[in-house]
């Protein structure tokens, strides 16, 4: 363990003998074997499946509860020409789930309606006003995707009004589970083989697979539907990666093959999103999970955060180039606006924390304002947690009502903490690391005090921990190693890009500031011995540490090796996650 700039560097201990054995069993380098072990992949069979995922490894849809029942009801609605509506969500997972199901109906020639919720009016999920509206419009079958597992009252109302509901979701159902016609959700399965970490779009993919079987009239899909399901992998990957579910098991398969299908997509809207993402690095033409996380996903989310997710859905489904051009301009505009609004709120929040918070005593940050846009508070809360390493709950206030988003840190399960002071809220929900809630604005101070009492960690112990995979010597870093590491792609939640540590390096020459306002810094390092190769290190958003680095002559680094291509030449450089300067 190393302590650096109020951070702790740590790594799991690797059994060298087991690492050597796994290297032989999996036919991989010792370095990759160590990376596999650090991810809990401890047998040759598991390693082979991880390094060589195949579509045939996807579990049969039948392992999901009530999926046959759901497919039969939907198939009957198609056959009897009933009025069908698909109800999704405004994030990437919800939009891609909706798009995937709409593509299926388009494939079989069935015209259906769809509805995406409004973040600012009805909020997430079904509400009774929507149910009444759809029932009065003559909808006979409502299919929810990426929501519905906690909509007891709404689904009961739908039944009263003569409308059947099929729920296709991945969220853990509430204790008082709803009673739809069919509830397809891996969390409801007693089958241990059912993969419970699917995103909403992953569950939808399974449902569409089962629906295709209904039309093929046998387990093995016809060539037409087999090709269709392969095309659907692109949307499945997009929603899976953006929803940050663990990229192992079935999610890894969907992401790996789906990224390739996204890259090959002939849909003009999807193609434009992909091409814009690839412009970030002109040296490659393959799509990565990072492209989804930092380029494609935020643009789709921006529509639902600031205006209407319908823009994003229409872009994904667009068949016309001109229409796609118009829609991607809308998403780009909304995303730029989202960045600007988020930056302004983040600066405001930081100023308030610096003036009104004693972080030696405070365990949580709770702030609200009438001027803050509710659509970006989750993103800002994440940045606040990253900077101050305290759970953060930020609220937008309107007419005395505070609606907010929370993000947490390791060791503080946010939803459990909120449950202990649930009497303060009108409604709340979420997960261990992310939650949301609504309460009277006058109760924000009481919430801050309550959470400070409930959280059982001393502020002095709230120190961020950076886990790295293993230590490397600079001499071990070459193109062969990078090719081996690439076998672990796609990276994402549950399978982060490997992070390496190298200790006690010599700084060569003087550091240089880079980028707008000198926000980045680059310098060269080598092992402290003459004649050794020097590597360029790039530390993004660490320009303020230039003077500190200049004062020292030795440094320890946490980094990811990357290939930088410029004017036809490629060199390996180290992209810095954190650094420790040893004063001269």
Image: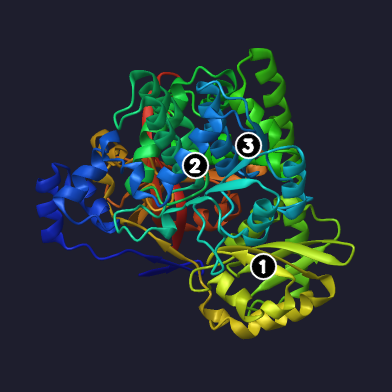
Residue at 52% in and 56% down? 171
Q: Nearer the viewer, residue 541 or 343?
A: 343
Which class describes the residues within 10 Å of circle 1: few (<14), some (14-19), or many (20+)? some
Nearer the N terminus, badge 2 or badge 3?
2
Q: Residue furthest bottom?
A: 453
Mark toward the viewer: 3 or 1:
1
Residue at 54% in and 64% down? 177
Residue 477 x, y percent position in the rendering: 28, 42
User: Whole-Å distance between the Cαs marked 2 and 1?
Assistant: 24 Å
Nearer the N terminus, badge 3 or badge 1?
3
Q: Residue furthest right?
A: 399
Residue at 23% in and 47% down? 32
Q: Is residue 290 visible?
A: yes
Q: Locate residue 42 relative to residue 426 in the image: left or right.
A: left
Quadrant of the drawing holding the N terminus? bottom left
User: Whole-Å distance between the Cαs marked 2 and 3?
Assistant: 15 Å
Residue 219 x, y percent position in the rendering: 30, 32
User: Whole-Å distance between the Cαs marked 3 and 1?
Assistant: 25 Å
Q: Which residue is mark 2?
A: 201
Q: Which residue is mark 1?
A: 428
Q: Which secondary structure lies at badge 1?
A: strand
Q: Which residue is mark 3?
A: 300
Answer whether labels 2 and 1 touch (C-beta < 8 Å).
Answer: no
Q: Locate residue 137 relative to residue 460 in the image: left or right.
A: right
Which class describes the residues within 10 Å of circle 3: few (<14), some (14-19), or many (20+)? many
Nearer the N terminus, badge 2 or badge 1?
2
Q: Nearer the viewer, residue 548 or 223?
A: 223
Q: Which secondary structure lies at badge 2?
A: helix
């Amino acid at each position: 363990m190393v302590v650096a700039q109020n951070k702790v560097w740590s790594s799991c201990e690797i059994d060298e003998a087991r690492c050597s054995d796994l290297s032989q069993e999996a036919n991989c380098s010792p370095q990759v074997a160590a990376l596999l072990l650090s991810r809990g992949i401890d047998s040759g069979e598991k390693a082979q499946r991880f390094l060589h995922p195949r579509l045939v490894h996807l579990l049969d849809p039948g392992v999901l509860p009530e999926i046959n029942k759901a497919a039969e009801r939907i198939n009957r609605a198609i056959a009897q020409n009933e009025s069908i509506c698909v109800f999704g969500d405004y994030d990437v997972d919800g939009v891609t789930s909706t798009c995937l199901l709409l593509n299926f109906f388009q494939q079989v020639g069935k015209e259906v309606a769809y509805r995406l919720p409004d973040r600012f009016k009805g909020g997430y999920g079904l509400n009774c006003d929507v149910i009444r509206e759809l029932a009065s419009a003559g909808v006979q079958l409502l299919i929810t995707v990426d929501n519905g597992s906690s909509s007891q009252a709404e689904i009961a109302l739908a039944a009263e009004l003569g409308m059947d509901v099929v729920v296709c979701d991945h969220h853990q159902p509430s204790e008082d589970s709803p009673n739809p016609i069919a509830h397809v959700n891996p969390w409801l399965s007693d089958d241990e083989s059912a993969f419970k970490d699917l995103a909403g779009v992953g569950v939808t993919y399974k449902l569409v697979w089962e629906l295709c079987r209904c039309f093929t009239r046998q387990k093995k899909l016809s060539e037409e539907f087999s090709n269709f399901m392969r095309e659907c992998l692109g949307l499945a990957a997009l929603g899976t990666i953006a929803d940050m579910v663990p990229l192992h098991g079935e999610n890894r398969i969907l992401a790996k093959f789906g990224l390739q299908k996204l890259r090959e997509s002939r849909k003009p809207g999807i193609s434009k999103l992909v091409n814009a993402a690839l412009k970030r690095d002109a040296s490659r033409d393959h799509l990565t999970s990072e492209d989804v996380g930092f380029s494609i996903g935020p643009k789709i989310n921006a529509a639902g955060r600031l205006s209407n997710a319908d823009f994003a859905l229409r872009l994904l489904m667009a068949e016309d180039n001109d229409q796609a051009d118009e829609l991607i301009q809308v998403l780009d505009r909304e995303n730029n606006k989202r960045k600007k609004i988020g930056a302004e709120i983040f600066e405001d929040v930081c100023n308030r924390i610096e003036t009104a918070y004693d972080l030696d005593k405070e365990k949580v940050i709770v702030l609200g304002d009438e001027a803050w846009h509710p659509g970006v508070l989750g993103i800002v809360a994440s940045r606040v947690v990253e900077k101050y390493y305290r759970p953060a709950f930020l609220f937008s206030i309107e007419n005395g009502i505070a609606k907010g988003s929370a993000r947490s840190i390791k060791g503080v399960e946010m939803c459990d903490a909120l449950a202990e002071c649930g009497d303060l809220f009108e409604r709340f929900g979420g997960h261990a690391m992310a939650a949301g809630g609504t309460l009277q604005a006058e109760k924000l101070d009481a919430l801050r005090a309550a959470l400070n009492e409930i959280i059982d960690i001393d502020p002095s112990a709230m120190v961020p921990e950076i886990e790295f995979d293993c230590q490397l010597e600079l001499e071990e870093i070459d193109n062969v190693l990078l090719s081996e590491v690439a076998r672990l792609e796609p990276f994402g939640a549950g399978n982060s890009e490997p992070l390496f540590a190298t200790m006690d390096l010599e700084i060569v020459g003087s550091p240089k500031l880079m980028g707008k306002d000198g926000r980045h810094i680059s310098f060269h390092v080598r092992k402290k011995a003459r004649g050794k190769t020097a590597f360029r290190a790039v530390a993004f958003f660490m320009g303020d540490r230039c003077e500190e680095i200049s004062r020292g002559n030795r440094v320890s680094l946490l980094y990811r090796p990357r290939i930088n291509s410029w004017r036809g030449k490629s060199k390996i450089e180290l992209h810095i996650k954190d650094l420790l300067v040893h004063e001269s």
